[in-house]
Image (tube, rainbow, N blue to C red):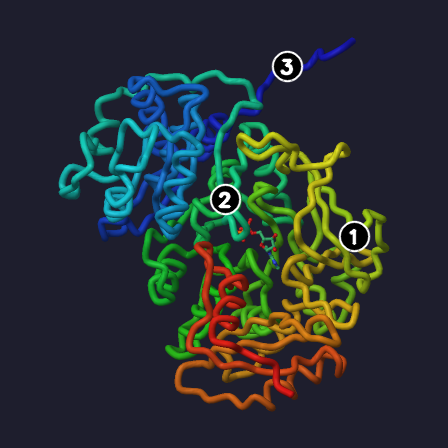
Amino acid sequence: MHNLMQDWPMLVGRIIDHAARFHPKRKLITRSVEGPIVESTWAKTRANSLRVSQALQKLGIGSGDVVGVMAWNTGRHMEVWFGVPGAGAALHTLNPRLFADQLVYVINHAEDKVLMIDHDLVPIIEAIWDRLTHVKHVVILTDADHMPDTSLPDVTCYEEWIAEGDGDFDWVKVDETNACGICYTSGTTGNPKGVVYTHRSNTLHAMASVQPDMLGLSSSDTIMPVVPLFHANGWSIGYAAPMVGARMVMPGRDMTPGALHEMLQIGRVSITAAVPTIWMLLLQHMEAEGLTLEALERVVIGGSSCPRAVIEKFQNNYDVQVLHAWGMTELSPLGTVCSFKPEVLEMESAARVDVQETTGHPPFTVDIKITDDAGQTLPWDNATQGRLWARGAAVVGRYLKADEHAADADGWFDTGDVSTIDENGYMRITDRSKDVIKSGGEWISSIELENVAVGHPDVAEAAAIGVPHEKWDERPILVIVPRPGATPEKQAILDLVGTRFAKWQVPDDVVFMDEIPHTATGKISKLNLRKILQDTGYKLPG
Ligand code: ADP
């Protein structure tokens, strides 16, 4: 009696079919790139996605082809999000903030044949056009009235292009293990690496991420992804929202705190997601302007460590629950989310916030472990730090065009992160393995130093790095960007750190800078920071 159930390949087209069939009128509200706030529905989004698939097929695009998309979070982007895999092709998300050389590299490496880009991003492609090796067509994601003047040859206007089709089309039938999307890692070391998601991995990953202990997403929610769809598979929200028929609010390209607050309010958003920096700026803005949040219930914070002050402010001042999450491009991206298990709900509220500084526990489909450098498994005692490994249904097996596997024979992928795990399975990222500060054979967590330092009221941003030291190997220093108008004192910051760290872990120095370098995904670039300190001849005191 083998396999008597139906053959039901997990193709992402089924997700938008479900949304259009059972939640047809649920809205997508967008601050359009052209300016005005516009509305669509799941039914209309599906209809236009089918037109995109149809139009791509007419261009000769199908299974095995790659379509690059460089666009802000909009309803139109969602049409393309399903239209490209619906044609059998893979959607390659492009980050407009990448340096030109990196963009050229990823577009050529993935062999993008078509580019679909927002009209304001055209100059970025114009500047690199001569270096693109495979691109044959460019579609501008706008209507006829907003088509820009461009030096690009033969550009197509999206709205006119899809209007030519009648949408009488079936999603191209591909195997569920066919490529569905491609997202490159940021390439802080060497060239970016391409992670190729399949229809199956994206579907399973979205099913895992909507669960109650993960995002807890339902048809009663309104979700606003502030995290761009081009960051790490858009944190899966582009699949998770239609899978449950949630309402969507799309912020477009305006990421200023005022604009985001406006969208949260007018869209009556119940759950939103982005990196900590976005929320620090929003909280500052709301405090300065005396603003409130009426509908927001949950905020997903990940991508880098979320400082305790941000968790406390959201929960205590605005009654918004923080869901601290850890993930990476290679994991599609969600690995763990910090929701409360019964063991945590029993705790006093301060102890619960301690737990929220961890990044939580994995859903079914993700497994994690920590080991020492020799590969020996380490205990889950909330104290022992080790290399963090992950495996699962939506974890990378091999990078695009790589000869080697990315995981070992048992499927374990070395995340490059360092963490502890507690007895309840809550995982705390303490560092990236290349950033951990090694002093006298002991490890000091740069992330924890930074989180304490940004708790100082005069500190806007903090980076802890190890500086070579003759006796101790490395000693930590803090690089601090003061809040505008503030002049924090070195000793006051070190005293604050001293309240949470042992004496030998307290940094040897504090260096003030107007600005700290960031990567294209908005994270602190310790590589560049180290270079700046080196170039300016920085020396440890004493
Ligand atoms: P990159 O930062 O290289 O562009 P990703 O966007 O995939 O790549 O980021 C993954 C990395 O971000 C993780 O390996 C981890 O170091 C870091 N990260 C993600 N979430 C968290 C978190 N909540 N706390 C600390 N670090 C995090």
- Give the alpha-carbon distance from disc 3 to disc 1, as whole Å: 45 Å
Residue 508 at least partly seen: yes
**Relative to 138, does residue 185 appear above or below in the rendering?**
below
The x, y position of residue 87, in whole percent, is: 40, 22
Front residue (pair 400, 338): 400
| In-image side of 153 versus 409 (left or right) | left
Dot 3 amino acid type: Gln
Question: Residue 262, located in which quarter of the rendered image?
Answer: bottom left
User: Disc 3 vs disc 2: Cβ atoms closer than 8 Å?
Assistant: no
Q: Which residue is mark 1?
A: 373
The x, y position of residue 289, in whole percent, is: 37, 77
- Give the alpha-carbon distance from disc 2 to disc 1, as whole Å: 25 Å
Say which element carries label 1: loop
Ligand 1 placement by image quarter: bottom right
Count neighbours of disc 3 (C-alpha within 10 A) and say few if under 14, some if 14 to 19, many if 20 or more. Answer: few
Front residue (pair 124, 144): 124
**Nearer-N-terminus badge (3/1):** 3
User: Disc 2 vs disc 1: Cβ atoms closer than 8 Å?
Assistant: no
At a point 36% along the width and 34% down the height, the residue shown is 79
Dot 1 amino acid type: Asp
Say which element carries label 2: loop
Q: Which residue is mark 2?
A: 192
At a point 50% along the width and 55% down the height, the residue shown is 273
Say which element carries label 3: loop
Dot 2 amino acid type: Pro
Count neighbours of disc 2 (C-alpha within 10 A) and say few if under 14, some if 14 to 19, many if 20 or more. Answer: some
**Relative to 457, does residue 21 appear above or below in the rendering?**
above
Q: Which residue is mark 3?
A: 6
Residue 219 at least partly seen: no
